[in-house]
């Protein structure tokens, strides 16, 4: 069956550093992949969508890469801030969501 | 973008009863989606609600348990019927909006309805 795996452990980093989150998938060849941010008690917020023919996409301090050979997407937050602390979800289309990685940025 | 509201935001219900969750969007959208997110779990798509036709349910979800209405392009309801404690979850409404200039789309979620069944 189709499956997404994200870092199951929480990621703790210092303010100003770059946070890198990983999303691996199996048994699937997605046309696109999305990343969302979810704060406690809130619905997910769309961040970026990257297509299979795009290697990299940027939006302000965010960068997403998509390697269809490795079946992996990396999500980077540069110059991280405490306000970036949240759970980040990757998803393949509308159907398959990862469990999310909790990011904590310490001042 | 799309602004989505859901009612109720939370509820505690007794087993065997039913709860109807409302989803309102601030603009017309073709497709609306209903998800469930159980504690510590990822989102699971329940069904896609299209205006003017029956909802399309994903594997493991049936209309008798989760009837959906879609009377117009800005509103939908999801009913959780004959509830049991296993139905305790957050239920999320979602819509898709195309971004024509980028030939892509963005997906927006409501704030969710936290349901506890006792």
Image (cartoon, coloured by chain):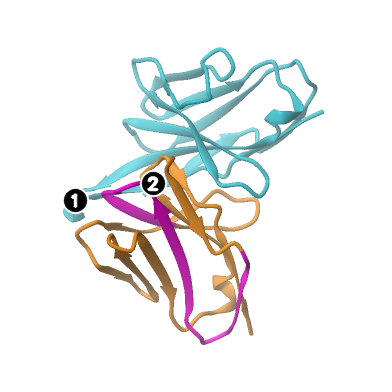
Chain colours: A orange, B cyan
Residue sitting at x 55%, y 52%: A99
* Mark pair 1, 2: CA separation: 14 Å
Q: Which residues are magenta?
A: A9-35
Side of B118 relative to B99 (left or right): right
Q: Vertically, is A91 above or below B21?
A: below
Reply yes or no: does residue B97 show up in magenta: no
- Label 1 neighbourhood size at 10 Å, few (<14), some (14-19), many (20+)? few
Q: Image quadrant of residue A51?
A: bottom left
Subunit that carries the residue with mark 2: B
Residue picked out by circle 2 = B107
Residue picked out by circle 1 = B103
Residue B91 appears at what percent x and percent y?
59, 36
Query: Between A71 and A91, which is closer to the camera in this rendering?
Result: A71
Residue sitting at x 39%, y 76%: A61
Residue B114 appears at what percent x and percent y?
68, 38
Numbered disc 2: secondary structure? strand
């Amino acid at each position: 069956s189709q499956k997404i795996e994200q870092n199951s452990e929480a990621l703790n980093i210092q303010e100003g550093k770059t946070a890198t989150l990983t999303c691996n998938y199996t048994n699937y060849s997605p046309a696109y992949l999305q990343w969302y941010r979810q704060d406690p008690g809130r619905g997910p917020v769309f961040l970026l969508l990257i297509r299979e023919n795009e290697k990299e996409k940027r939006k302000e301090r965010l960068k997403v890469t998509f390697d269809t050979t490795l079946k992996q997407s990396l999500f980077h937050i540069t110059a991280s801030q405490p306000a970036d602390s949240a759970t980040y979800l990757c998803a393949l289309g509308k159907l398959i969501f990862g469990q999310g990685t909790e990011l904590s940025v310490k001042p | 973008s799309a602004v989505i509201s859901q009612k109720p935001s939370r509820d505690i219900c007794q087993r065997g009863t039913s709860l109807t969750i409302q989803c309102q969007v601030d603009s017309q959208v073709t497709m609306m989606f209903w998800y469930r997110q159980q504690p510590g779990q990822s989102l699971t798509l329940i069904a896609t609600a299209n205006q003017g036709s029956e909802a399309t349910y994903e594997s493991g979800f049936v209309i008798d348990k989760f009837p959906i209405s879609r009377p117009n392009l800005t509103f939908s309801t999801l009913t959780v019927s004959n509830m049991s404690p296993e139905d305790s979850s957050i239920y999320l409404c979602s819509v898709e909006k195309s971004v024509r200039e980028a030939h892509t789309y963005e997906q927006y979620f409501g704030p969710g309805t936290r349901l506890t069944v006792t």
